Amino acid sequence: MHRILLFCLLLLASPAQAASDLTDGVWLTTGYGHAYAIDGEHLQRFEITAISCQKSASAERVAASGNAVRFAGSSVNNDTGVTDAFVFRPGQQPNQLVLNVDGVATQTQLTRIDALPAACTQTSSIDPVTNFDVFVRTFAEHYPFFTQHRVDWVAMTAAHRATISSATDEQTLFAHFREMLAPLEDAHVWIEAPALHLEFSGWRPPAARSEAIHQRALAIVEKRFLTTPLAWYCNRQLAFGMLPDGVGYLLIVSFENYDKNAESTAQTAALDAALDDIFGKAPGLRGLIVDIRPNGGGTEMLGLAIAARLTTKTYLASSKIFRIDPTDPTKFSKPQPIMVMPSSRPGFYGPMALLMGHDSVSAAEAFAMSLQGRTNKPVFIGENTQGVFSDVLIRHLPNGWRFGVPNEIYLNENGQAYDITGVPPDKLVALFTDPDLDAERDPALEAAARAIAETTRPGRTPNSPRN
């Protein structure tokens, strides 16, 4: 009788509730320093170090399908540019989950723990020493590039901490953080103190070009090279025009803000509509030049969606490894492959060139890596990219400040990383020099057009894959 009653109760339970049961509890990530506390409808994420625990993103359960449970938040992740959302599925072992975060191409592994760390019950402190310790400890546990930058973080931490006390004012504390981060020259490293209106972001020299220079360069492209006006798409983050001899010009300003709705599905839908229009109206393309020279990044998933329109074969875009031991900076996860999967929607498979440079950052660089394995590999023209690839761990200090720290390394199919140096061009061409701008020249675009002309064989069917 009891078994029959239990069976009936299970039948009456809603699928959504049954699915949510698998996520209930406290979960600790492998790497990344996150803990998730989930209680039915609500999710709270915590940022964990060996000495601290800080609340960060929160979300509510919005859907369950099969054994997958989705939680969505109300804030936009300023690394990926999409609304925070989390999808959990069962892991390979009991008491394990697999997490997919919207805008991120790989998965995170979680293990159930009995309770949140004791630090999660402590009151936040505005004490400068406490905030300093949390800041430096987070970098010590996650940052993978101290050796490459020749920065002794332990010695630097000791030197700065010796001058900090409970009496240190906020402006001075911020100056210490800025001085510690500057030698890293890492565009994915930043800190901001909103109440003080202070912020600092790293960058590998030379300095980033201004928006005015990029606009001036684009005006030259439109005036001197295009045979059709630029058609703008995706909230003016994408544009397409035609060059002579049937060559298309695709400008990708960024990989974010493709739609006013920051949800990832809306961003992808806007991109799909744009690419359907672009490639649907130009089936006779003989070549394609893609320009990411002004592209400051966004979400890697949008770049992969574009790469999917440029291939008929599945191939490896890159692999990702990340720090898994907070005390040993040499220990990394096994590589997680990131694949380019061909799309059945309109695309282009013929000769290509990619224009890139020092201002091509983050997701733009991952996009460049994703094209290295393409059949009919594009010719890369311009400068080395900026040299930052990792997703950014956005962390919070007890005093309300925020900072960003990368913890991942992207590898190409040969196991090579381009962090710090950037993705190199096949043809090195200086970009946007004063003499070229004054003379309304674009040598990189000219070189791209020549490269495509050299690879277009007489009698070859336009827009056909070369095997």
Image (tube, rainbow, N blue to C red):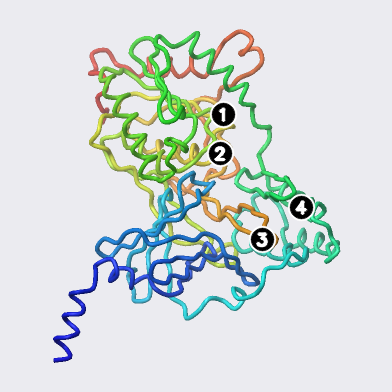
Task: Check the image and report above or below for 415 versus 303.
Answer: below
Q: Earlier in the sequence, mark 3 or mark 2?
A: 3
**What amino acid is at disc 3?**
Leu
- Where in the figure is residue 322, as x and y percent of width and height? 51, 58
Q: Which labelled disc corresponds to residue 383? A: 1
Question: Which three-letter amino acid code belongs to the residue tagged 4?
Answer: Phe
What is the spatial separation of the Cα atoms under label 1 and label 3, in whole angstroms? 37 Å
The CA distance from mark 1 to mark 4 is 33 Å
Q: Is 48 left, or right, of 311 in this rendering?
A: right
Q: What's the distance in space between the residues labelled 4 and 3, CA to CA?
A: 12 Å
Q: Is residue 326 above or below residue 424?
A: below
Specify the quadrant that holds the C terminus.
Answer: top left
Task: Tell me the mark number nearer the camera, choosing from 4 and 2.
Answer: 4
Q: Which residue is mark 4?
A: 174
| Left or right: residue 260 compared with residue 433 | left
Query: On screen, 247 above or below 355?
Result: above
C-alpha separation, residue under disc 3 versus residue under disc 2: 30 Å
Instruction: Between residue 388 and residue 53, name the one nearer to us.
Output: 53
Q: Disc 3 designates what residue?
A: 397
Residue 253, horizontal then vertical, whole percent: 49, 29
| Mark 2 secondary-structure assignment | loop
For mark 2, what is the residue? 422
Q: Are the residues at dot 1 and dot 2 in contact (C-beta closer than 8 Å)?
A: yes
